[in-house]
Amino acid sequence: MLSNRLQDTALRYFLEVVRSGSVSEAATRLNVSPSAVSRQVAGLEEMLGVPLFERRPRGMAPSPAGELLAAHARRGALEADRVVSDIEALQGLRRGVVRVCSSGGFAIEFLPRAMALFREQYPGMQFHLRVQAPAAVTQAVLGGEADVGLTYSRAAARDIEVWHRQVSPVVAIMRPDHALARHASITLAQMHPHAIALPEDANTARQLFDIACSHRRLVFEPALVSGQFETLVHFVLHGGGLSLGGEVTMRERVRRGELHAAPIRERGMNARAIELQTLSGRTLSKGVRAFVEHLRELLPPG
């Protein structure tokens, strides 16, 4: 059968070209010659009878057939990882690595706390956490670069299994001594006279904020714009003014009395949701599945 002739080496070399977009870069990462990579890719193309890449001035991009083969290869690699993890788990969850990708706010306090709590029960488990823009988190899960994604989403994504979903309204964050901190919720008109620090455009809270401002015909001139969420938080903590966030990401700081969070009382400010994501159709290792279940318990609003 044709499927039995798809060799591990050829697929591994092919996937590295997909990841790097270049035969020479793939060869460097694989520590082999570029000709060896080219031969393996050419062999796959000859066997399948279709081109797997589109050669472009700035590199190589997978063709439609290449995208299908890459999806197959990634699933095969993930299944191999799962088998190894499950063999290690035969004596209990003593060892294993969980690769997590999240948007910025979750990486500050929620996920480190969740990981520390998980390791109290399973001290041999290890984590690798990457921080990406919300849409890039989903892409990391789809590409097999992350076992688990935790992000804000505004629409369903194909081939993503959602283990937990909860609406996450945008909140204004401020110091407890800020002039607006006496309000349980606030409007854009109330916020407008005050200094504000805003996330960059790729942030879902910023996107909803901008849409609401457009509806209200209000223009905010931010004192600070940053893609680093912790930078925005510290700007607020040092008395710089307001910023935007989510309930889960701010939960512990609000509980400790460091910050006050007030929902923004405007149409559309709840049009996003927290999603706990894995790749649809993938059989999760015992360690990954246990951590996903752990996160599901922690995510509902406290």
Image: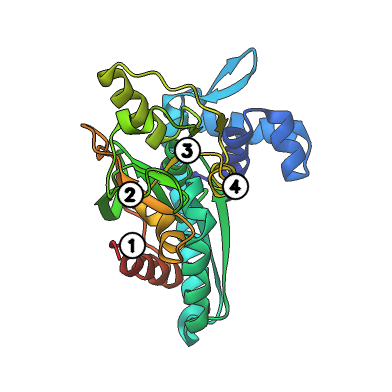
Which one is earlier in the sequence, the residue at label 4 or at label 3? 3
**Residue that numbered label 2 is attached to:** 274
Label 1, label 4: how far apart the Cα atoms are: 29 Å
- Mark 2, other Cα within 10 Å: few <14 / some 14–19 / many ≥20: many
Amino acid type of disc 2? Ile
Q: Which residue is drawn at 56% across and 36% down?
A: 227
Relative to residue 73, is residue 220 depicted above or below?
above
Q: Which residue is drawn at 58% across and 47% down?
A: 234
Question: Do callouts 4 and 3 mark residues in contact (Cβ within 8 Å)?
Answer: no
Q: Considering depth in this image, is 187 or 206 the residue closer to the camera? A: 187
Rendering coords of residue 183 (x, y %):
30, 47
Amino acid type of disc 3? Ala
Relative to residue 228, is residue 57 depicted above or below?
above
Label 4, label 2: how far apart the Cα atoms are: 28 Å
Which one is earlier in the sequence, the residue at label 1 or at label 4? 4
Relative to residue 183, is residue 128 depicted above or below?
below
Which one is earlier in the sequence, the residue at label 3 or at label 2? 3
Amino acid type of disc 1? Leu
- Mark 1, other Cα within 10 Å: few <14 / some 14–19 / many ≥20: some
